[in-house]
Image (cartoon, grey):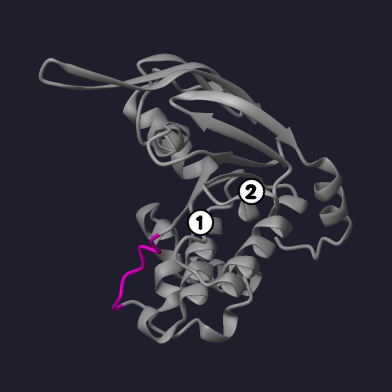
């Protein structure tokens, strides 16, 4: 689903250069749950921004579902981002004066979908994350875990093949964090591809595979397929 080959990213300011990514190479299979771990400053967020087509590499290739988007024009990248990718962040980025349902429909409004169809799809997305009964509530009326569920429903609304998550449990208590990871696990079990960035080893151990990023390079890889196989056997069939 994802091929990353020799990605390099350099930030420049005046006469100073900082090389954040240094020839990063890896692949992500369709339907895989991959975690990228690393300490602060290791390049995790920069890498996720490139995968999300929010930033461009200075060198190397990035293929998403077979298409090389490394040097594609902005329109091509924007279309691929809208069709293929869903985003979940540590900060929930919800509109405070909009209901959960309205927040979930926003990506469809930007894509000029029919309003009636948008509402139906948003309701199904909220049901998929167990939050249909809170659809009319404002973010201020929801717990942190519920707000993150709304954010996941919003990420699902365009039926993306890949979900990119940046420290999605970082602002949650332990129980809420586990509930969010359970949702991610079930989404993967029914065929979604998930790339999650974290510094938390307990979060990483819910994945199929862990890559460790240090000083802009992949320094180790760990496969946890026995855990993934067991989780798939218990899949609950989220859409």
Mark 2 vs mark 1, foreground winner is 2
Q: Is residue 15 magenta?
A: no
Q: Is residue 94 magenta?
A: yes
Q: Position of residue 212 (x, y in %)?
A: 58, 33
Cα–Cα gap, marks 2 and 1: 20 Å
101 above or below 41? Answer: below
Q: Position of residue 222 (x, y in %)?
A: 72, 34
Residue 1 quadrant: top right
Q: Residues within 10 Å of mark 1 (few under 14, many from 20)?
A: many
Residue 225 quadrant: top right
Q: Is residue 29 visible?
A: no
Q: Considering depth in this image, is 136 or 5 the residue closer to the camera? A: 5
SS under mark 1: helix
Left or right side of 14 for 232: right
**Residue occupying image coordinates x 62% and y 33%:** 211
**Residue occupying image coordinates x 51% and y 44%:** 85
SS under mark 2: helix
How many callouts does the rendering have?
Answer: 2
Residue 42 quadrant: top left
Q: Which residue is mark 1?
A: 155
Q: Position of residue 203 (x, y in %)?
A: 62, 54
Residue 204: image tag = 2
Q: Is residue 229 visible?
A: yes
Residue 52: image tag = none
Q: Position of residue 150 (x, y in %)?
A: 49, 70
Q: Considering depth in this image, is 193 or 48 the residue closer to the camera? A: 48
Q: Residues within 10 Å of mark 2 (few under 14, many from 20)?
A: many
75 above or below 17? Answer: below
Residue ranking furthest to the left:
14
Residue numbers of the magenta segment: 91-97
Magenta stretch prevailing secondary structure: loop
Left or right side of 94 for 190: right
């Amino acid at each position: 689903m994802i091929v990353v080959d020799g990605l390099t990213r350099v930030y420049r300011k005046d006469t100073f250069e900082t090389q954040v990514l240094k020839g990063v190479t890896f692949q992500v299979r369709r339907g895989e749950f991959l975690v990228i771990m690393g300490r602060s400053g290791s390049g995790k967020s920069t890498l996720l921004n490139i995968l999300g087509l929010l930033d461009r590499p200075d060198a190397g290739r990035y293929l998403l579902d077979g298409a090389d988007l490394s040097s594609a024009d902005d329109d091509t990248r924007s279309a691929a981002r809208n069709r293929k990718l869903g985003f979940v962040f540590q900060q929930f980025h919800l509109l405070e004066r909009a209901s959960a349902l309205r927040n979930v429909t926003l990506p469809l409004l930007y894509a000029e979908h029919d309003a009636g169809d948008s509402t139906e799809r948003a309701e199904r997305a909220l049901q998929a994350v167990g939050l249909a009964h809170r659809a009319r509530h404002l973010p201020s009326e929801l717990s942190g875990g519920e707000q993150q569920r709304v954010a996941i429903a919003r990420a699902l609304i365009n039926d993306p093949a890949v979900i990119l998550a940046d420290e999605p449990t970082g602002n949650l208590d332990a129980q809420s964090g586990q509930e969010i990871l359970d949702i991610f696990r079930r989404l993967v079990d029914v065929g979604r591809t998930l790339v999650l960035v974290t510094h938390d080893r307990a979060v990483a151990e819910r994945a199929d595979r862990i890559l460790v990023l240090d000083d802009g390079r992949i320094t180790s890889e760990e496969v946890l397929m026995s855990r993934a196989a067991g989780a798939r056997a218990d899949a609950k069939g989220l859409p």
